Image (cartoon, rainbow, N blue to C red):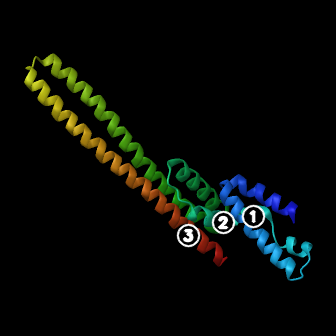
């Protein structure tokens, strides 16, 4: 039993965080112990379980339950979910749909970063142009003030949109994990 649990823990640590792996190992240890207490032989019990298959089948459920509160955890969960969806012939269409939605989300985030960078470059060009145009001090200060207010507003809107896309990514992970789990149970 200890050998199987160590093998299961090794497979789970490859895919999941340490606390997630420990929870699953503990769950299977309880199941095996309960079956041993009911009189089954250890060989019969262990023949019912495959560590690699358990790790693969738990992916949708574990990813769905994750907090996914940082960019790093969202990226890891998205990658794991995508690999899981594309590894099963039954789930490949779901994997393609998830991939398309992820591409749209990443494109939107890239567009927001591009807008911020372009506006900074544009503001720099505007300031240079104003300096060379011979405008008075009041006009230059007024234009710079308006430019900085618009730029600040653009930054605030971009941050809100970034946070909205991050929340959308979390929801998508949950939705597609749930769909994969439900479809996997129907097999």
User: Left of 106 or right of it: where is 137?
Assistant: left
Q: Name the residue under label 3.
A: 178
Label 2: which secondary element: helix
Q: In which image quadrant can residue 35 be found?
A: bottom right
Residue nearest the observer in this picture, 70 or 133: 70
53 above or below 159?
below
Task: Give how far apart the Cα atoms at labels 3 and 1 are.
Answer: 22 Å
Task: Give how far apart the Cα atoms at labels 1 and 2 are.
Answer: 27 Å
Q: Residues within 10 Å of mark 1 (few under 14, many from 20)?
A: many
Q: Which of marks 3 and 2 is nearer the N terminus?
A: 2
Q: How crowded is mark 3: few (under 14 residues within 10 Å), some or many (20 or more)?
A: some
User: Left of 21 or right of it: where is 85?
Assistant: left
Q: Residue at x 84, y 63 (%)?
A: 4
Q: Which residue is drawn at 81% across and 66% down?
A: 50
Residue nearest the observer in this picture, 75 or 1: 1
How many labels were placed on the picture?
3
114 above or below 126?
below
Residue 18 is situated, as x and y percent measured from the top left of the image, at 68, 54
Q: Mark 2 points at which residue?
A: 89
Residue 164 is situated, as x and y percent measured from the top left of the image, at 38, 55
Q: Mark 1 points at which residue?
A: 25
Which numbered mark, 3 or 1, is in the foreground of this view?
1
């Amino acid at each position: 039993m200890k050998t199987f649990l160590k093998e299961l823990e090794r497979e789970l640590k490859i895919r999941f965080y340490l606390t997630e792996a420990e929870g699953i190992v503990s769950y299977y240890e309880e199941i095996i112990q309960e079956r041993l207490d009911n009189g089954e032989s250890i060989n019969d019990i262990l023949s019912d379980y495959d560590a690699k298959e358990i790790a693969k089948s738990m992916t949708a459920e574990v990813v769905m339950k994750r907090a996914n509160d940082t960019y790093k955890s969202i990226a890891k969960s998205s990658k794991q979910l995508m690999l899981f969806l594309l590894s099963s012939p039954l789930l490949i269409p779901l994997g393609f749909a998830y991939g398309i939605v992820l591409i749209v989300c990443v494109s939107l985030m890239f567009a927001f970063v591009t807008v911020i960078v372009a506006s900074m470059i544009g503001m720099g060009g505007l300031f240079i142009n104003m300096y060379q145009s011979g405008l008075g001090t009041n006009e230059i200060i007024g234009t710079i003030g308006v430019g900085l207010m618009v730029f600040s507003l653009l930054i605030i809107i971009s941050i809100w949109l970034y946070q909205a896309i991050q929340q959308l990514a979390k929801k998508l992970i949950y939705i597609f994990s749930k769909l994969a789990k439900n479809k996997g149970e129907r097999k």
